[in-house]
């Protein structure tokens, strides 16, 4: 009986030791995901405020503060405005321009 009780204790402690890092990692990831969502929303708002930009044709994705713009714009001027507007948003670490100019 004592061996079984000791084995159960060891298994419980081992399971707890394995669970703690995963729980902590999940807690650290949650604010980043929320922060990326906020940045995405702010960038989309900034694009909507650009009068000469058809921002509905531009997709915004954010990962760890890095923003990727993709989609279509009508000319190089719109492309430049989109990148500049995204770069000006607080929390944006960088902007990857994957926009395509329609001809």
Image (tube, rainbow, N blue to C red):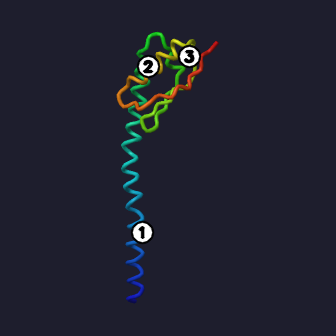
> Label 1 to label 2, Cα distance in Å?
50 Å
Q: Name the quadrant containing residue 35.
A: top left
Quadrant occupied by the N terminus = bottom left
Task: Name which quarter of the figure residue 38 lies in.
Answer: top left
Q: Which residue occupies the foreground of this view, 99 or 48?
A: 99
For image coordinates 42% across by 35% down, the residue present is: 65
- The answer to whether 55 is drawn above or below residue 29 in the figure is above
Count residues near mark 2 (Cα–Cα under 10 Å), then give few for <14, some for 14-19, many for 20+.
some
- What residue do we see at 43% from left, 38% from top? 64
- Residue bearing the label numbered 3: 73
**Could you tell me residue 5's position as x and y percent?**
38, 83
Q: On the image, which quarter does residue 43 sit in?
A: top left
What is the C-alpha distance between the residues marked 3 and 2? 14 Å
Callout 3: 10 Å neighbours few (<14), some, many (20+)?
A: many
The answer to whether 82 appears left or right of 23 in the picture is right
SS class, disc 1: helix
Is residue 20 placed above or below 8 in the rendered structure?
above
Q: Which residue is mark 1?
A: 15
> Residue beneath label 2, please?
84
């Amino acid at each position: 009986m004592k061996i079984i009780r000791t084995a159960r204790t060891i298994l419980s402690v081992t399971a707890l030791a394995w669970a703690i890092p995963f729980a902590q990692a999940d807690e650290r990831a949650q604010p980043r995901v929320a922060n990326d969502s906020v940045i995405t929303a702010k960038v989309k708002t900034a694009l909507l405020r650009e009068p000469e930009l058809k921002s509905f044709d531009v997709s915004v994705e954010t990962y760890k503060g890095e923003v990727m713009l993709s989609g279509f714009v009508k000319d190089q001027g719109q492309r430049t405005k989109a990148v500049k507007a995204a770069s000006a948003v607080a929390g944006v670490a960088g902007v990857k321009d994957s926009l395509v100019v329609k001809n």
